[in-house]
Image (cartoon, coloured by chain):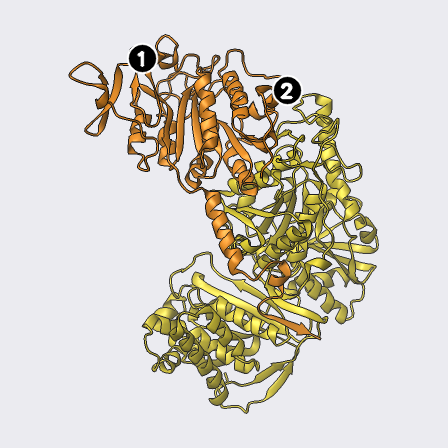
Amino acid sequence: MITAKEEVKQEQLEAVIIRFVGDSGDGMQLTGTQFSDTSAMFGNDVATFPNYPAEIRAPQGSLYGVSGFQVHIGSVEISTPGDNVDLLVAMNPAGLKTNLHALKPGHTVIVDTDAFSKKNLEKALYESNPLEDGSLENYRVIEVAMTSLTKESLKQVEGLDNKSITRSKNMFALGMVYWMYDRSPEYTIDFFNKKFKSKPQIIEANTKVLNAGFYFAETLELIPNAYTIAPAKMEAGTYRIIMGNTATAWGFLAAAEKSGLELFLGSYPITPASDILHELVKHKHFGVKTLQAEDEIAGITSAIGASFAGDLAITTTSGPGLALKGEALGLAMMIELPLVVVDVQRGGPSTGLPTKTEQSDLLQAMYGRNGESPIIVIAASTPANCFDYAYEAAKLTLEHMTPVLLLTDGYIANGSAPWKIKSVENMPEIKNNVIKEGHENWHPYDRNEESLARNWAIPGSSGLEHRVGGLEKDRVTGNVSYIPDNHEFMTKIRAEKVKRVQNYIPDLETEFAQEGDLLVVGWGGTYGSLHSAVKQMNDDGYSNIGFAHFNYINPLPKNTAEIFKKFKKIIVCELNSGQFVQVLRINHDEFEYQQLNKVQGLPFANLELTQKFKSLVK
Amino acid sequence: MEAAVKEYTYKDFSSDQEVRWCPGCDDYVILRSMQKALPEMGVKKEDVVFISGIGCSSRFPYYMDTYGMHSIHGRAPAVASGVKLANPDLSVWVITGDGDSMAIGGNHFIHVLRRNLDLNIILFNNEIYGLTKGQFSPTSLVGQKTKSSPYGNTQPPFSAGELALGAQARFFARISGNTPKEMTQLFIEAEKFKGTSLIEVLQNCPIFNDGCFTKFTDKAVREDQMLYVEHGKPMIFGKERNKGLVLNGLKLETVTIGENNITEQDVLVHNAKLEDPTLHQMLVRLEYPMVTGIIRSFDDVTLEEREDALTEQVKSDSNFTKTDDLFFSGDIYSVF
């Protein structure tokens, strides 16, 4: 335990992981977001991971009411929020208890001693006070009476109630951390000025407390070390920090502009997908139409209606909502209309773990409909590339006239990272299959010979009046048909249409070893964890390990087998019990697959990956 | 100026598909009334869209030579809402039945009425499930013997009108399935109305629930049993045109003109445009006489109007015209 005053010294670090934890009402999400945004503005690469309870305000001080926000910042490329942390800021005993295991031995924990009351210790199920019983011997503990210091610093500010005063103690903690990592509080003060424009006393209070924390850390010399982290070497360009869900929303905005169609979103609120709805409702200036529907089914069926009428139509949800949308998604597939369904995966089954991450909706996405109803399934893999895959989902659905299911997950959807801003003019072209005028012998299910996409006749176009529906239709006229051979033909052509998407998507790429002993295979939101684990092993001399990450699930990239052939062993890593590996076994049963699975509602930890990989290459 | 709408006849709206309803079904009457009403509405054929759910009634779009979608069970109001929001210039019609709208699709039915988009809903109410062959529906009567209630139905029914008015329907009309002339007129009125219009057709199912409405729709009795209301006119009915409705306390009462000093002036004049739906609720609930015609037609702001106004406001307040304006706004930074 550090008790003596130490000389303040500057250390140059490549990367640091900080976790802020406290009660769910303590403002930890805001504190963490401010720290990561400030660091990004400073030029660091960042990755974040919010971890909060499903309850909005769980009982104060309880273990299950702990809310946390982890930030990984660095002067090197950062691809995950990281596992074990260098600095833990614990605003109460419950936060300390539930997070201490993640703190690296010998590293620093800052605690608010005012929160370590008998009552709070009991609520956190501590039998004795950890600040006094020696149980923190292996760590550097910085004890700060943050609540009292916050109150003291606000003595002169008028018109504040007691609650507002105590609630700003998170800014005291943030101020301290800013000083420790050589960050200016300016960005956050700007943020206060914008956010609380009409409440000058709140701006004043927050600014005061933030500065108080900053100067406290500087002048009282309670901080054992101070660090600086140099800006990261990143590709030149203009950047902004973006959250995965915002990137998804913006990808659709870009696709609508590029395709010249209007964007329609039909959606029902669900964690962790609602932020896409919150983002898109803001953009009426681009003509975005949104309907917050009465339920998940109306969300998707209103989107189907909008698609029938010629809009770029999307619906957003998470696992339980996707289950409800199943029948309607089958309809969209059957009538061959463009539609994007976004599933921001969360822990399942049933209500499961709404605020935790998982990849367990993959098979639902692939097969969760009645009858044979294949659709295109793709997955984003980082907060920033949610933009690209939302754009790609829109492009594929418009060009191929079949629904696309875009999988993201709570981890990348709520995580944020620097995004090198893309201008719409540089995005790939989006064609569509709209037909404006009919000709003799025109039929609604006339197809493009290469892609098999049907043509899209939109209400309002004279001479193209036609009916679509969930009943099987004649292969030529599109009228209802119960003829056995025709049904089989139509079943096959709908499947073939999806299969042919292979001709339009990029090849699978391998990172690190291009051939060798072990190929690490992943898909979707685990990219960052897997990439950094394989990179670390390569840095450590394991030059025989390659890494292939899938964004295209159905269909799989054409060259999948060619890549798999080049490695002696293949290990498929997923945050479920083995779903993608089943898809691989169905499509490429000539290979043997090892598995690494985790179903804890948490991302992979670096160590569990590298240990497993090492066991496979010796 | 808009191009003049060409002159259509009912044939322009008949598709080449053979109609497959059972012989004698009132659905044929509804189909023909619609095909006759459309040329009178001043809408272009390519702007007409029929959206249905599942059930006998929901085959309707296949028989109309317009745009149409036979969607999934109960969801037509949501599909139609999407169509209308995507293109408010279209004339959008929902075709549904009592099971489709009030059982599996009950949620969408009440919410579409609450929102008040400018679309039209035709509810084919035959108080039975037809396509699944004869189970009781949410409008079947208590005691009714059906395939799934062989000893009599124990579930009390919904009244479509009561449910609709409870869900804030601005336009509600009811019509007997065997009065095509009035039905055609109601369809035209529904299209004219700005807002969601709901027309309940008392539609006889000759196979599974034959005669369920006969006691007031039969030609021999209907003038005495049914009151066809018209806005601004006294609510008088009967072969002799001598029966009328008066308000007695909190109840509607049937009186005979010429008896007990009652004159035509005593009979209530129908006001469909009242914002307060209390009287309309009372008309909907009456069993004798069975009230048909436009019971409620209250002009209100539509959802599209609210959305349009909001969009215009946001557009004029915003500096964003292209997505680049958004992407490069706020906290951005450069790496060199």
Label 1 or label 2, whichever comes before in sequence order: 2
Quadrant of the image containing the C terminus of chain A: bottom right
- The residue identified by callout 2 is B17
Q: Taking B328 as reference, is A475 left or right? A: right
Instruction: Please name which of the two marks, 1 or 2, marks the residue nearer to the observer.
Output: 1
For this orientation, the residue located farthest to the front is B1
- Against A542, residue A296 (above or below) is above
Chain A, chosen colour in render: yellow
For this orientation, the residue located farthest to the top is B220
Chain B, chosen colour in render: orange
**Label 2: chain?**
B
Local SS, label 2? loop
The image position of residue B67, as x and y in percent, is: 61, 30
Can the viewer see residue B217? yes
Give me the residue at 62% from left, 66% from top: B328
Q: Amino acid at mark 1?
A: Asp
The image position of residue B124, as x and y in percent, is: 46, 23
Can the viewer see residue A82? no
Q: Amino acid at mark 2?
A: Gln
Local SS, label 1? helix
The disc label shown at residue B224, or none: 1
Q: Taking A506 as reference, is B2 left or right? A: left
